[in-house]
Image (tube, grey):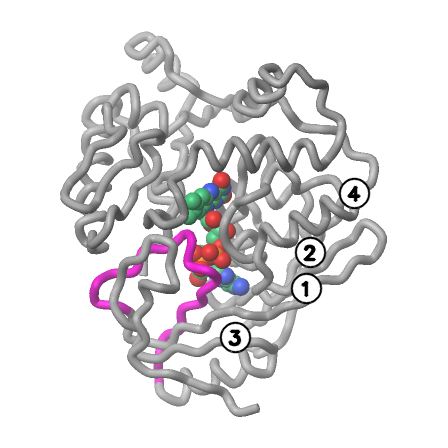
Amino acid sequence: MALHILEQVPLAPFTTMHVGGNARFFVRVKSIEDLQESILFARAKNLSIFILGSGSNILVSGDGYSGLVIKIELKGITYENSRVTAGAGEVWDEVVRGVVQYNLWGIENLSLVPGTVGGASVQNIGAYGVEACDTIFSVEALDTETMQIKTFLRKECEFGYRESIFKKNKNLIVVSVSFELTENGVPRVDYEDVKKYFEKKKVIVSTLVEIREAIVAIRTRKMPAPSIGTAGSFFKNPIVEVSQYEALKIQFPGIKAYPQGDSTIKLSAAWLLDHVGKWCGVRRGDAGVYEKQALILVNYGKATAEEILSLAHEMRCDIKEKTNVLLEEEVVML
Ligand SMILES: Cc1cc2nc3c(=O)[nH]c(=O)nc-3n(C[C@H](O)[C@H](O)[C@H](O)COP(=O)(O)OP(=O)(O)OC[C@H]3O[C@@H](n4cnc5c(N)ncnc54)[C@H](O)[C@@H]3O)c2cc1C
Protein backbone atom coordinates (compact mmCIF):
# COMPACT_ATOMS: atom_id res chain seq x y z
CA MET A 1 0.00 0.00 0.00
CA ALA A 2 1.27 3.47 -0.84
CA LEU A 3 2.54 5.61 2.02
CA HIS A 4 0.10 8.16 3.32
CA ILE A 5 2.22 11.23 4.05
CA LEU A 6 0.23 14.07 5.57
CA GLU A 7 1.10 17.76 5.67
CA GLN A 8 0.81 20.32 8.46
CA VAL A 9 -0.29 17.89 11.16
CA PRO A 10 -0.75 19.28 14.71
CA LEU A 11 1.60 17.39 17.01
CA ALA A 12 0.01 18.33 20.35
CA PRO A 13 -2.55 15.46 20.22
CA PHE A 14 0.33 13.02 19.67
CA THR A 15 2.02 14.00 22.93
CA THR A 16 1.03 13.46 26.55
CA MET A 17 1.97 17.09 27.31
CA HIS A 18 -0.66 18.22 24.77
CA VAL A 19 1.42 21.14 23.49
CA GLY A 20 3.27 22.07 20.32
CA GLY A 21 2.86 23.22 16.74
CA ASN A 22 2.56 21.34 13.45
CA ALA A 23 4.74 18.78 11.71
CA ARG A 24 5.44 19.93 8.14
CA PHE A 25 5.12 16.24 7.11
CA PHE A 26 3.79 13.34 9.16
CA VAL A 27 3.54 9.62 8.46
CA ARG A 28 2.53 6.51 10.40
CA VAL A 29 4.64 3.44 9.61
CA LYS A 30 3.32 -0.08 10.14
CA SER A 31 6.09 -2.03 8.35
CA ILE A 32 9.83 -1.83 7.79
CA GLU A 33 9.16 -1.18 4.09
CA ASP A 34 7.00 1.85 5.07
CA LEU A 35 9.81 3.05 7.29
CA GLN A 36 12.41 2.72 4.52
CA GLU A 37 10.11 4.46 2.04
CA SER A 38 9.52 7.34 4.49
CA ILE A 39 13.25 7.84 4.90
CA LEU A 40 13.72 7.95 1.13
CA PHE A 41 10.90 10.51 0.92
CA ALA A 42 12.64 12.70 3.51
CA ARG A 43 15.98 12.34 1.74
CA ALA A 44 14.52 13.30 -1.62
CA LYS A 45 13.07 16.46 -0.09
CA ASN A 46 16.14 17.12 2.09
CA LEU A 47 14.04 16.96 5.26
CA SER A 48 15.21 16.10 8.75
CA ILE A 49 13.46 13.21 10.49
CA PHE A 50 11.98 12.87 13.98
CA ILE A 51 10.95 9.46 15.25
CA LEU A 52 7.81 9.48 17.37
CA GLY A 53 6.63 6.73 19.68
CA SER A 54 3.64 7.78 21.76
CA GLY A 55 5.00 11.20 22.65
CA SER A 56 5.16 10.59 26.39
CA ASN A 57 8.65 11.99 26.88
CA ILE A 58 8.82 14.90 24.46
CA LEU A 59 8.07 18.60 24.46
CA VAL A 60 7.22 20.04 21.06
CA SER A 61 7.85 23.76 20.54
CA GLY A 62 5.13 26.12 19.38
CA ASP A 63 6.94 26.36 16.02
CA GLY A 64 6.42 22.65 15.49
CA TYR A 65 8.78 20.63 13.31
CA SER A 66 9.82 21.59 9.79
CA GLY A 67 10.84 18.05 8.74
CA LEU A 68 9.14 14.66 8.60
CA VAL A 69 7.73 13.10 11.79
CA ILE A 70 7.63 9.31 11.51
CA LYS A 71 5.25 7.71 13.99
CA ILE A 72 6.34 4.15 14.70
CA GLU A 73 3.40 1.73 14.62
CA LEU A 74 5.33 -1.52 14.08
CA LYS A 75 3.37 -4.20 15.90
CA GLY A 76 3.64 -7.87 16.86
CA ILE A 77 4.58 -9.83 19.97
CA THR A 78 6.16 -13.29 19.91
CA TYR A 79 6.88 -15.62 22.81
CA GLU A 80 9.70 -18.16 22.58
CA ASN A 81 9.94 -19.77 26.01
CA SER A 82 11.08 -16.90 28.23
CA ARG A 83 12.25 -14.73 25.31
CA VAL A 84 9.66 -12.14 24.34
CA THR A 85 10.04 -9.99 21.23
CA ALA A 86 7.82 -6.98 20.60
CA GLY A 87 7.50 -4.50 17.74
CA ALA A 88 8.72 -0.99 18.57
CA GLY A 89 5.21 0.41 18.20
CA GLU A 90 3.62 -1.90 20.75
CA VAL A 91 2.27 -0.15 23.84
CA TRP A 92 4.76 -0.83 26.63
CA ASP A 93 2.23 -1.49 29.37
CA GLU A 94 0.29 -3.94 27.21
CA VAL A 95 3.47 -5.96 26.80
CA VAL A 96 4.02 -5.89 30.58
CA ARG A 97 0.44 -6.99 31.19
CA GLY A 98 0.88 -9.84 28.70
CA VAL A 99 4.10 -11.20 30.19
CA VAL A 100 2.64 -11.05 33.69
CA GLN A 101 -0.24 -13.21 32.43
CA TYR A 102 2.33 -15.64 30.99
CA ASN A 103 4.00 -15.72 34.42
CA LEU A 104 7.25 -14.25 33.14
CA TRP A 105 9.24 -12.13 35.60
CA GLY A 106 11.49 -9.17 34.93
CA ILE A 107 9.54 -6.10 33.85
CA GLU A 108 6.58 -6.13 36.27
CA ASN A 109 7.98 -3.17 38.26
CA LEU A 110 7.80 -1.13 35.04
CA SER A 111 4.01 -1.53 34.88
CA LEU A 112 2.03 1.50 33.72
CA VAL A 113 5.04 3.46 32.38
CA PRO A 114 3.52 5.22 29.35
CA GLY A 115 4.97 4.90 25.85
CA THR A 116 5.97 2.35 23.26
CA VAL A 117 8.40 -0.56 23.41
CA GLY A 118 10.74 1.39 21.11
CA GLY A 119 10.62 4.44 23.40
CA ALA A 120 11.29 2.21 26.43
CA SER A 121 14.53 0.94 24.90
CA VAL A 122 15.67 4.35 23.62
CA GLN A 123 15.07 6.02 26.99
CA ASN A 124 16.01 2.92 29.00
CA ILE A 125 13.00 3.50 31.22
CA GLY A 126 13.27 2.83 34.91
CA ALA A 127 10.99 2.68 37.93
CA TYR A 128 10.85 1.05 41.36
CA GLY A 129 14.40 -0.29 41.23
CA VAL A 130 14.24 -1.78 37.74
CA GLU A 131 15.44 -0.55 34.34
CA ALA A 132 14.43 -1.81 30.89
CA CYS A 133 18.06 -2.72 30.15
CA ASP A 134 18.04 -5.30 32.99
CA THR A 135 16.03 -7.66 30.79
CA ILE A 136 16.65 -6.44 27.23
CA PHE A 137 18.40 -9.22 25.36
CA SER A 138 18.74 -7.44 22.00
CA VAL A 139 17.37 -4.55 19.98
CA GLU A 140 16.81 -4.50 16.22
CA ALA A 141 17.26 -1.11 14.61
CA LEU A 142 17.21 0.26 11.09
CA ASP A 143 20.39 2.17 10.31
CA THR A 144 19.30 5.03 8.05
CA GLU A 145 22.82 5.33 6.60
CA THR A 146 22.95 1.77 5.27
CA MET A 147 19.16 1.19 5.24
CA GLN A 148 19.93 -2.22 6.81
CA ILE A 149 18.48 -3.76 9.97
CA LYS A 150 21.14 -4.40 12.57
CA THR A 151 20.84 -6.43 15.78
CA PHE A 152 22.38 -4.89 18.90
CA LEU A 153 23.02 -7.24 21.80
CA ARG A 154 22.48 -5.69 25.23
CA LYS A 155 26.17 -4.88 25.75
CA GLU A 156 26.23 -3.04 22.39
CA CYS A 157 23.26 -0.83 23.31
CA GLU A 158 25.36 1.46 25.57
CA PHE A 159 22.59 1.62 28.14
CA GLY A 160 22.92 4.11 30.96
CA TYR A 161 20.63 6.14 33.15
CA ARG A 162 17.87 7.14 30.64
CA GLU A 163 20.49 6.64 27.93
CA SER A 164 21.20 4.29 25.05
CA ILE A 165 23.04 4.22 21.75
CA PHE A 166 19.65 4.76 20.08
CA LYS A 167 19.20 8.04 21.92
CA LYS A 168 22.69 9.25 20.99
CA ASN A 169 22.80 8.05 17.38
CA LYS A 170 19.89 9.56 15.46
CA ASN A 171 20.61 7.26 12.48
CA LEU A 172 19.25 4.31 14.43
CA ILE A 173 15.52 3.62 14.47
CA VAL A 174 14.40 0.85 16.81
CA VAL A 175 12.09 -1.62 15.06
CA SER A 176 11.80 -4.37 17.69
CA VAL A 177 13.09 -5.34 21.13
CA SER A 178 13.71 -8.81 22.66
CA PHE A 179 13.50 -9.36 26.40
CA GLU A 180 14.96 -12.29 28.30
CA LEU A 181 12.55 -12.90 31.15
CA THR A 182 12.37 -15.70 33.68
CA GLU A 183 9.75 -18.12 34.97
CA ASN A 184 11.37 -18.26 38.40
CA GLY A 185 11.72 -14.65 39.47
CA VAL A 186 11.70 -13.10 42.89
CA PRO A 187 9.62 -10.06 43.85
CA ARG A 188 11.67 -6.86 43.93
CA VAL A 189 9.90 -4.94 46.65
CA ASP A 190 12.77 -3.15 48.37
CA TYR A 191 11.89 0.22 46.84
CA GLU A 192 10.39 2.47 49.53
CA ASP A 193 6.88 2.97 48.08
CA VAL A 194 6.50 -0.70 47.19
CA LYS A 195 7.76 -1.89 50.58
CA LYS A 196 5.33 0.46 52.37
CA TYR A 197 2.43 -0.71 50.17
CA PHE A 198 2.86 -4.36 51.20
CA GLU A 199 3.61 -3.50 54.85
CA LYS A 200 0.32 -1.61 55.00
CA LYS A 201 -1.54 -4.50 53.38
CA LYS A 202 0.14 -6.90 55.81
CA VAL A 203 0.73 -9.49 53.05
CA ILE A 204 3.88 -11.27 52.01
CA VAL A 205 4.02 -10.68 48.31
CA SER A 206 4.61 -13.75 46.20
CA THR A 207 3.00 -13.45 42.78
CA LEU A 208 3.62 -11.36 39.71
CA VAL A 209 -0.01 -10.29 39.61
CA GLU A 210 0.26 -8.90 43.17
CA ILE A 211 3.31 -6.85 42.23
CA ARG A 212 1.72 -5.48 39.08
CA GLU A 213 -1.40 -4.56 41.06
CA ALA A 214 0.75 -2.80 43.66
CA ILE A 215 2.72 -0.80 41.08
CA VAL A 216 -0.45 0.17 39.21
CA ALA A 217 -2.07 1.32 42.49
CA ILE A 218 1.02 3.29 43.61
CA ARG A 219 1.48 4.98 40.24
CA THR A 220 -2.22 5.80 39.86
CA ARG A 221 -2.15 7.51 43.25
CA LYS A 222 1.04 9.44 42.55
CA MET A 223 0.70 10.48 38.90
CA PRO A 224 -1.54 13.18 37.48
CA ALA A 225 -4.77 11.96 35.85
CA PRO A 226 -4.21 11.11 32.16
CA SER A 227 -6.36 14.13 31.16
CA ILE A 228 -3.68 16.46 32.63
CA GLY A 229 -0.83 17.17 30.23
CA THR A 230 2.54 15.90 31.43
CA ALA A 231 5.65 14.16 30.13
CA GLY A 232 6.48 12.42 33.42
CA SER A 233 9.71 13.39 35.18
CA PHE A 234 10.93 16.57 33.55
CA PHE A 235 14.48 16.35 34.98
CA LYS A 236 16.89 13.47 35.50
CA ASN A 237 18.19 12.66 38.96
CA PRO A 238 21.59 14.41 39.06
CA ILE A 239 24.69 12.29 39.64
CA VAL A 240 27.36 14.00 41.77
CA GLU A 241 30.64 13.08 43.46
CA VAL A 242 30.24 11.61 46.97
CA SER A 243 32.26 14.57 48.34
CA GLN A 244 29.66 17.02 46.99
CA TYR A 245 26.88 14.88 48.48
CA GLU A 246 28.60 14.86 51.89
CA ALA A 247 28.75 18.67 51.84
CA LEU A 248 25.10 18.93 50.79
CA LYS A 249 24.10 16.51 53.56
CA ILE A 250 25.43 18.94 56.17
CA GLN A 251 23.34 21.74 54.70
CA PHE A 252 20.27 19.57 53.95
CA PRO A 253 20.31 16.63 56.44
CA GLY A 254 17.32 14.76 54.94
CA ILE A 255 18.66 14.78 51.38
CA LYS A 256 17.63 11.65 49.49
CA ALA A 257 20.34 9.88 47.50
CA TYR A 258 21.15 6.52 45.92
CA PRO A 259 24.77 5.23 45.98
CA GLN A 260 26.03 4.17 42.54
CA GLY A 261 28.68 1.73 43.72
CA ASP A 262 31.52 4.04 42.64
CA SER A 263 32.70 7.53 43.62
CA THR A 264 29.38 9.03 42.57
CA ILE A 265 25.91 9.22 44.06
CA LYS A 266 22.52 9.86 42.46
CA LEU A 267 20.53 12.60 44.16
CA SER A 268 16.75 12.64 44.11
CA ALA A 269 15.82 15.60 41.91
CA ALA A 270 12.26 15.39 43.28
CA TRP A 271 13.59 15.82 46.85
CA LEU A 272 15.75 18.81 45.90
CA LEU A 273 12.88 20.50 44.07
CA ASP A 274 10.41 19.76 46.84
CA HIS A 275 12.48 20.37 49.99
CA VAL A 276 15.12 22.84 48.83
CA GLY A 277 13.06 24.69 46.24
CA LYS A 278 9.50 24.22 47.56
CA TRP A 279 8.31 23.84 43.99
CA CYS A 280 5.34 21.47 44.52
CA GLY A 281 2.12 23.07 43.31
CA VAL A 282 3.76 26.24 41.93
CA ARG A 283 1.95 27.60 38.89
CA ARG A 284 2.84 30.10 36.20
CA GLY A 285 -0.45 30.45 34.30
CA ASP A 286 -1.33 27.05 32.89
CA ALA A 287 2.23 25.74 33.27
CA GLY A 288 2.75 24.22 36.68
CA VAL A 289 4.52 21.81 38.97
CA TYR A 290 2.33 18.88 40.01
CA GLU A 291 1.21 19.33 43.62
CA LYS A 292 2.17 15.77 44.66
CA GLN A 293 5.50 15.49 42.80
CA ALA A 294 7.91 18.34 42.14
CA LEU A 295 9.62 16.51 39.26
CA ILE A 296 6.48 16.50 37.16
CA LEU A 297 5.68 19.58 35.12
CA VAL A 298 2.12 19.84 33.95
CA ASN A 299 0.05 21.64 31.39
CA TYR A 300 -3.16 22.58 33.19
CA GLY A 301 -4.87 23.62 29.98
CA LYS A 302 -3.46 26.04 27.47
CA ALA A 303 0.22 26.23 28.47
CA THR A 304 2.69 26.61 25.61
CA ALA A 305 5.99 24.76 25.32
CA GLU A 306 7.75 28.06 25.83
CA GLU A 307 5.89 28.67 29.13
CA ILE A 308 6.75 25.18 30.34
CA LEU A 309 10.39 25.68 29.39
CA SER A 310 10.48 29.04 31.15
CA LEU A 311 9.16 27.42 34.36
CA ALA A 312 11.72 24.60 34.02
CA HIS A 313 14.46 27.22 33.59
CA GLU A 314 13.32 29.01 36.75
CA MET A 315 13.42 25.72 38.69
CA ARG A 316 16.86 24.76 37.35
CA CYS A 317 18.33 28.18 38.24
CA ASP A 318 16.84 28.02 41.73
CA ILE A 319 18.35 24.58 42.50
CA LYS A 320 21.71 25.56 40.98
CA GLU A 321 21.83 28.68 43.11
CA LYS A 322 20.91 26.88 46.33
CA THR A 323 22.88 23.64 45.90
CA ASN A 324 25.29 24.15 42.98
CA VAL A 325 23.70 21.07 41.41
CA LEU A 326 22.67 21.35 37.77
CA LEU A 327 19.44 19.62 36.79
CA GLU A 328 19.43 18.13 33.32
CA GLU A 329 16.24 17.57 31.33
CA GLU A 330 14.99 14.02 30.82
CA VAL A 331 12.31 15.17 28.39
CA VAL A 332 13.38 15.32 24.73
CA MET A 333 12.86 18.75 23.10
CA LEU A 334 11.52 19.02 19.60
C1 LIG B 1 2.77 10.17 33.38
C2 LIG B 1 4.13 9.72 32.92
C3 LIG B 1 4.88 8.88 33.72
C4 LIG B 1 6.15 8.44 33.33
N1 LIG B 1 6.85 7.62 34.14
C5 LIG B 1 8.08 7.18 33.79
C6 LIG B 1 8.82 6.32 34.63
O1 LIG B 1 8.36 5.90 35.69
N2 LIG B 1 10.06 5.94 34.21
C7 LIG B 1 10.59 6.35 33.03
O2 LIG B 1 11.72 5.97 32.72
N3 LIG B 1 9.89 7.16 32.18
C8 LIG B 1 8.66 7.59 32.54
N4 LIG B 1 7.96 8.42 31.71
C9 LIG B 1 8.54 8.83 30.43
C10 LIG B 1 8.07 7.98 29.22
O3 LIG B 1 7.01 7.16 29.59
C11 LIG B 1 9.19 7.11 28.65
O4 LIG B 1 10.34 7.85 28.34
C12 LIG B 1 8.74 6.35 27.39
O5 LIG B 1 9.59 5.27 27.18
C13 LIG B 1 8.71 7.19 26.12
O6 LIG B 1 8.18 6.35 25.08
P1 LIG B 1 7.42 6.99 23.85
O7 LIG B 1 7.07 5.89 22.93
O8 LIG B 1 6.29 7.81 24.31
O9 LIG B 1 8.57 7.88 23.23
P2 LIG B 1 8.46 9.38 22.69
O10 LIG B 1 8.13 10.29 23.81
O11 LIG B 1 7.60 9.41 21.49
O12 LIG B 1 9.99 9.62 22.26
C14 LIG B 1 10.99 9.74 23.23
C15 LIG B 1 12.37 9.71 22.52
O13 LIG B 1 12.58 8.41 21.98
C16 LIG B 1 12.76 8.48 20.56
N5 LIG B 1 12.10 7.29 20.00
C17 LIG B 1 10.85 6.82 20.28
N6 LIG B 1 10.65 5.66 19.62
C18 LIG B 1 11.77 5.41 18.91
C19 LIG B 1 12.18 4.36 18.02
N7 LIG B 1 11.38 3.33 17.73
N8 LIG B 1 13.44 4.43 17.48
C20 LIG B 1 14.26 5.47 17.76
N9 LIG B 1 13.92 6.49 18.56
C21 LIG B 1 12.70 6.46 19.13
C22 LIG B 1 12.12 9.79 20.14
O14 LIG B 1 12.69 10.27 18.93
C23 LIG B 1 12.45 10.67 21.34
O15 LIG B 1 13.77 11.12 21.23
C24 LIG B 1 6.67 8.86 32.08
C25 LIG B 1 5.91 9.68 31.24
C26 LIG B 1 4.64 10.11 31.66
C27 LIG B 1 3.83 10.97 30.74
Would you name the residue on which mark 3 appears? Answer: 144
How busy is the neighbourhood of tag 3: few (under 14 within 10 Å), some, or many (20 plus)?
A: some
Residue 260 against residue 196 in the figure, above or below: below
Q: Which circle's residue, 2 or 4, is located before the other in the chain?
A: 4
Q: Nearer the viewer, mark 4 or mark 1?
A: 4
- Left/right placement of residue 88 relative to residue 10 reads right
Determine whether label 3 and label 1 are within 8 Å by CB. no
Instruction: State the separation of the CA atoms marked 2 and 4.
Output: 21 Å
Q: Position of residue 78 (x, y in %)?
A: 76, 62
Q: Which residue in the protein does label 2 denote?
A: 138
Q: Identify residue type, mark 4.
A: Asn
Q: Secondary structure at mark 3?
A: loop
Q: Earlier in the sequence, mark 4 or mark 1?
A: 4
Give the secondary structure at mark 2: strand
Range of residues picked out in magenta: 46-64
Residue 52, by quadrant, is bottom left
Determine contact: label 2, label 4, CB under 8 Å. Answer: no
Answer with left or right where residue 313 lies relative to residue 145: left
Foreground mark, 3 or 2, reads 2
Residue labelled with disc 1: 151
> In whole angstroms, how far apart are the C-alphas of marks 1 and 2?
7 Å
Tag 3: amino acid: Thr
Residue type, label 2:
Ser
Q: Which residue lies under the disc numbered 4?
A: 103
- Asked if the beta carbon under badge 3 is closer than 8 A to the nearest atom of ligand 1, the reply is no
Q: Is residue 52 magenta?
A: yes
The residue positioned 55% from the left and 82% from the top of the image is 34
Q: Residue at x 78, y 43 (%)?
A: 103
| Residue 35 is one of the magenta-drawn residues | no
Mark 1 and mark 2 residues within 8 Å of each other at the beta carbon: yes
The x and y percentages for residue 117 are 58, 57
